[in-house]
């Protein structure tokens, strides 16, 4: 499976080359493939905030490279650069509040600096750590894909209809995807009849990004309005809803793109299984439950306008961009450390003690 997945890899969104971060501008997809180059922490912070790069693992990886860029500039400026770097850390950490991968990656770099041996070059050590975060996310994708496919096959070995939300593919990760990685692997294994991709208002990650990624690989994909999900669960033979996550708390509650919670409620009602696929860097054991997760609210204009044109009456608009699915609506959480079925606090704690499976 690993080799087949690697051979099928087509899309990439993050490229660290010659000390510069290159990001595929996801705001323009699928109409234009434009790469933007960043050489400062402030530039990377703005890229994350403005959604040039998005998806929990991808913003963690980008932030890590952003901190490397910050360290390079701070060291060149002299003075107490390690202390000054805290400003870049905060700037990057504050860009988007819900996905914990962002702070997880930044903390890994900070810890690396704290563990620095006297003979080590701090910049080289930081860069190596950022590259390792990037590469290990790719490995985690491969492991999760296999585990997710095993899970699907265990419940039913025939080709099936799957439903997914937002974009959790190559564009959202350092590899080829979390939930979409499982879907890709299931397709390569002959287990997919059709994928229903929610359009994912208001940023249209499903319509613009997931549909593009899947169609590019020949996976049969149908785009549907977010509001069609319950109807499709009733009529289209969907067996699994498979989604990613931005933060999973110690009890197994899952924050993900707005609309995920209602999918889980509908899945439970229709007897459709619900799978969450996320690397362990998305699990936040410091928070007991989803009630504690900060939910990002974005500008109401994202709802009131489309491509800069008004599409609604000029009223107040409320725009929470994530929601929390309670653990008891989730059949399985798939991570690179293993699978947790019917998640709860004890099972999550046990999982986090395990080593990665790759
Ligand atoms: O606002 P976005 O596009 O960053 O939201 C992305 C999601 O909600 C994804 O489902 C999640 O980050 C998992 S990506 C592997």
Image (spheres, rainbow, N blue to C red):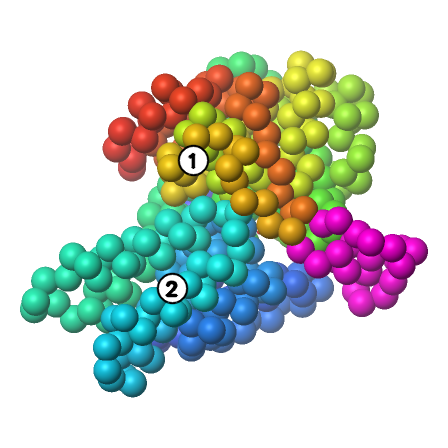
Determine if the magenta segment contains residue 106: no
Q: Secondary structure at mark 2?
A: helix
5 above or below 315? above
Placement of the C terminus among the 4 image quadrants: top left
- The residue at which mark 2 appears reads as 89
- Residue that extends furthest to the right in the rendered view of this protein: 313
State the image coordinates of residue 247 (x, y, percent, origin top left).
Answer: 49, 40
Could you tell me which residue is drawn at 71 percent across and 59 percent down?
299
Res. 105 visible in picture = yes
Could you tell me which residue is drawn at 45 percent across and 46 percent down?
100
Decide which of tag 2 and tag 1 comes sooner along the chain: 2
Dominant secondary structure of the residues highlighted in magenta in the image: loop
Could you tell me which residue is drawn at 79 percent across and 40 percent down?
225
Q: Quadrant of residue 126?
A: bottom left
Q: CA distance from mark 2 to mark 1?
A: 21 Å
Q: Nearer the viewer, residue 136 or 79?
A: 79
Q: Nearer the viewer, residue 31 or 281?
A: 281
Res. 7 visible in picture = no
Magenta-tinted stretch: 298-319
Determine if the magenta segment contains residue 309: yes
Q: Nearer the viewer, residue 300 or 159?
A: 300
- The residue at which mark 1 appears reads as 287
């Amino acid at each position: 499976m690993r080799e087949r997945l690697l051979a099928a890899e087509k899309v990439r969104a993050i490229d660290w080359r010659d000390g510069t971060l290159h990001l595929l501008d996801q705001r323009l997809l699928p109409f234009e493939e434009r790469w933007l180059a960043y050489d400062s922490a402030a530039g990377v912070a703005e890229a994350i905030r403005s959604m040039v790069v998005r998806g929990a693992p991808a913003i963690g990886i980008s932030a890590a490279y952003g901190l490397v860029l910050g360290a390079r500039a701070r060291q060149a400026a002299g003075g107490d650069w390690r202390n000054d770097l805290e400003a870049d850390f905060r700037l990057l950490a504050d860009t988007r509040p819900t996905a914990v991968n962002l702070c997880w990656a930044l903390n890994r770099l900070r810890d690396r600096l704290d563990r620095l041996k006297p003979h080590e070059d701090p910049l080289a050590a930081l860069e190596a750590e950022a590259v390792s975060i990037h590469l290990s996310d790719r490995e985690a994708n491969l492991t999760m894909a296999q585990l997710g496919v095993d899970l699907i096959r265990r419940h039913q070995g025939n080709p099936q209809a799957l439903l997914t939300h937002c974009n959790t593919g190559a564009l959202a990760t350092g590899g080829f995807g979390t939930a979409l990685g499982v879907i890709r692997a299931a397709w390569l294994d002959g287990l997919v009849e059709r994928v229903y991709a929610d359009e994912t208002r208001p940023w249209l990650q499903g319509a613009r990004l997931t549909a593009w990624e899947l169609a590019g690989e020949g996976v049969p994909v149908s785009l549907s309005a977010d509001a069609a999900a319950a109807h499709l669960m009733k009529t289209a033979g969907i067996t699994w809803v498979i989604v990613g996550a931005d933060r999973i708390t110690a009890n197994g509650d899952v924050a993900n793109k707005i609309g995920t919670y209602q999918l889980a409620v509908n899945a439970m009602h229709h007897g459709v299984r619900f799978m969450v696929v996320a690397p362990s860097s998305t699990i936040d054991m410091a928070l007991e439950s989803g009630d504690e997760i900060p939910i990002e609210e974005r500008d109401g204009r994202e709802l009131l306008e489309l491509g800069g044109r008004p599409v609604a009456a000029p009223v107040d608009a409320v725009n929470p961009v994530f929601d929390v699915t309670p653990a008891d609506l989730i059949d399985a959480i798939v991570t690179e450390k293993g699978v947790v079925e019917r998640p709860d606090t004890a099972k999550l704690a046990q999982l986090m003690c395990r080593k990665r499976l790759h």
